[in-house]
Image (cartoon, rainbow, N blue to C red):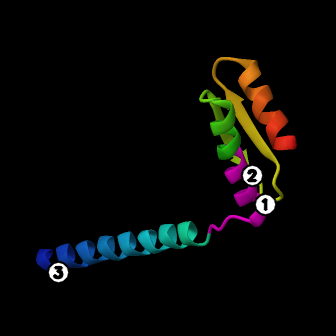
Amino acid sequence: MRAADRLTFSSSRRAATRVILLLIVMGACSGTQLTPQQEWVMSKFAECKTITNAVNVKLEQVWPDGRWTATVMQTQSEYNHLVALHAG
């Protein structure tokens, strides 16, 4: 096998590997859909955050069944306002 043939084979093999990896990543991202519970929690969280002006509270994770976790950067009272509104 000539050096030029090896180079072409190696380049095309790397390109094929990149295409396969790209397709896997695209498939993983496009298959992720939010459940109605997740959508509801996220919209209510944003609404409550606006109402309470709790700018230092961050929604960390929302599970498919609607359970959620949040973190607060400065004050516990901002978090408490959000929890109270979300529960209501």
The residue that appears at 68% across and 64% down in the rendered structure is: 34
**Residue at 61% from the left image edge and 27% from the top image edge:** 56
Mark pair 1, 3: CA separation: 56 Å
The kind of residue tagged 2 is: Val
Write the residue at 78% across / 45% down: 68
Q: Residue 59 placed where, x, y %?
A: 67, 40
Q: Quadrant of the N terminus?
A: bottom left
Q: Secondary structure at mark 3?
A: helix
Q: Which mark is residue 37?
A: 1
Q: Earlier in the sequence, mark 1 or mark 3?
A: 3
Where residue 85 appears, x then y in whole percent? 80, 38
- Whether pointer 1 and pointer 3 mark residues with C-beta atoms closer than 8 Å, the reply is no
x, y percent for residue 10:
26, 73
- Residue 5 place in picture, x, y as percent: 17, 80
Residues under numbered marks 2 and 1 in contact, where contact means CB atoms less than 8 Å apart? yes
In what element is the residue under mark 2? helix
Identified by mark 3, the residue type is Asp
What crowding class fits label 1: few (fewer than 14 Cα within 10 Å), some (14-19), or many (20 or more)?
some
Task: Say which of marks 1 and 3 sits in front.
Answer: 1
Q: Quadrant of residue 9?
A: bottom left
Q: Is residue 13 left or right of residue 7?
A: right
Local crowd size for mark 2, using a 10 Å CA cut-off: few (<14), some (14–19), many (≥20): many
- What numbered label is drawn on residue 41? 2
Badge 3 local density, few (<14 within 10 Å), some, or many (20+)? few
Q: Which stretch is magenta?
A: 32-45
Instruction: Tell me which amino acid carries mark 1.
Output: Gln
Residue identified by numbered label 3? 5
Which of the two residues, 18 or 54, is positioned nearer the viewer here? Answer: 54
**70 over 36 or under it: above or below:** above
